Each structure stands twice: as structure tokens, then as C-alpha cells.
Amino acid sequence: MKNKLIRILPFAFLGAIVATICDANHVFTETLSYPDPFLFDQAWFVFPGFVVAFTFMAINYLFAPALFPKAATSKESTSSGSLSVFVESLLFFMMVYLLSGFGNHYPNLLSVIFFSSFFIRLAFTYEKTFILLFAIILGIGGMAVEGAMTQLDLVHYREPEIFGVPYWLGGVYMHGALALREGMRNFVYREN
């Protein structure tokens, strides 16, 4: 278990780097803004916040099968993965994240694209119930945390539709669950 917890750190840092770059796209496309920008018009807490977020998500992923053993099978989702599948999943997540910036003037269209493409991907993946549960938790949790950040005046979205955030944000997080699974399989569950 200790080795798995240590392996979360490089995963969390890689996730934070990718998310910070994608967040910079959100700033550039005026999808969101920070009241007190620091570097590249992003707040000082963006990168450290993403490190904490990815660490938290990874720890939750690590303990989810033990906490909810009857909810879904997770044998393959908690086994060693391949680098190519991880890269593909990460790139798909990045494309969704970047598209949310460039398409932010069309929030309803983004919502349809993100949620429908997630369910198409879900139809062709393994251990559907496990990843669907995790994606729903991630989608709701991510929107709640970012919504709380808007209420604390830490960030502002151009199209705040629910609790200060756009609906499509849940779809981004749900796609993130698929990338998270492959990242966990590649970094944390990998065989030595």
C-alpha cells in the first residue's frame, strides 16, 4: 500500500501540469477568470490546487474498491495498465478540456457533446458500473468544489449555469474519470 501511495505523487504532478495548461486555455479563451491573477492570468493556487485535487482523486480511486466492494467489479480497473492506453485516454481528456475553452460560447452544445461522448465511450469500455459510479462522483464533486470556489470569489466562469459553474463542467470531469483510471493503472497499479 505504501508503494501505491508514493506512486500517486508523479501521477498527481503530471495531472496538475496538464490541467494547469488546459486551465490557461480557459483563461485565454475567457471561459473563466481569476480576480487576482498571478502568472499567465491564472491565480497562484491553480497548480498547487491541481496537485491536491489529483492526489485526492487518486487516493479516493485507490480506496473505492475496498469501500464499495459490492457496488461494482473493479478487477481490471485496479490492475496494471498500458502506456499507450493511458496516453490515448489523457489526450482525449485534454481535447475535451481544450474544446470547453474554445466552445465556451455554446454551453448547451458543449454539454450535449461532452455527456453523449462520455456515454459512447462508456459503452465500449470495461467495468462500466465501476467507472460510471466514479465518473458521477467526480462530476458532482468537481462541480461542487469549483462552485464553492466561485462562491468564495476565487474564480468566475463566463457562463455560470448552476452553482456558479457551467453544466458542461460535469462532462469534463466525467471524461477525466476515464483518464484517471488509466493513469492509476499506469502509475499506481503498474507491475514492477
Image: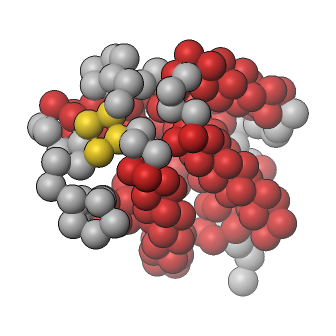
Image: 97 above or below 3: above
- Please tell me how many numbered marks the rendered image carries: 0
Q: Is residue 37 left or right of residue 58?
A: left
Where residue 51 sits in the image (x, y, percent)?
37, 65
- Camera sees residue 1: no
The answer to whether 162 is drawn above or below residue 78 in the figure is above
Residue at 60%, 25% in the rendered image: 110
Q: How is the image coloured?
A: secondary structure
Q: Quadrant of residue 54?
A: bottom left
Q: Position of residue 80 (x, y in %)?
A: 75, 65
Please report the residue visible at 33 percent of the width from the left and 33 percent of the height from the top: 157
Residue 83 picture quarter: bottom right
- Toward the bottom, the furthest residue is 192
Q: Position of residue 169 (x, y in %)?
A: 48, 32
Q: Position of residue 116 (x, y in %)?
A: 72, 21
Residue under the point 70% across and 30% down: 118
Seen in the picture, residue 189 relative to 105 is either above or below; the reply is: below
User: Which quarter of the rendered picture does the C terminus lie within?
Assistant: bottom right
**Looking at this rendering, what residue extends furthest in the right direction?**
124
Residue 152 visible in the current orientation: yes
5 sits left or right of 162 in the view = right
Tell me what residue is drawn at x 79 percent, y 57 percent. 88
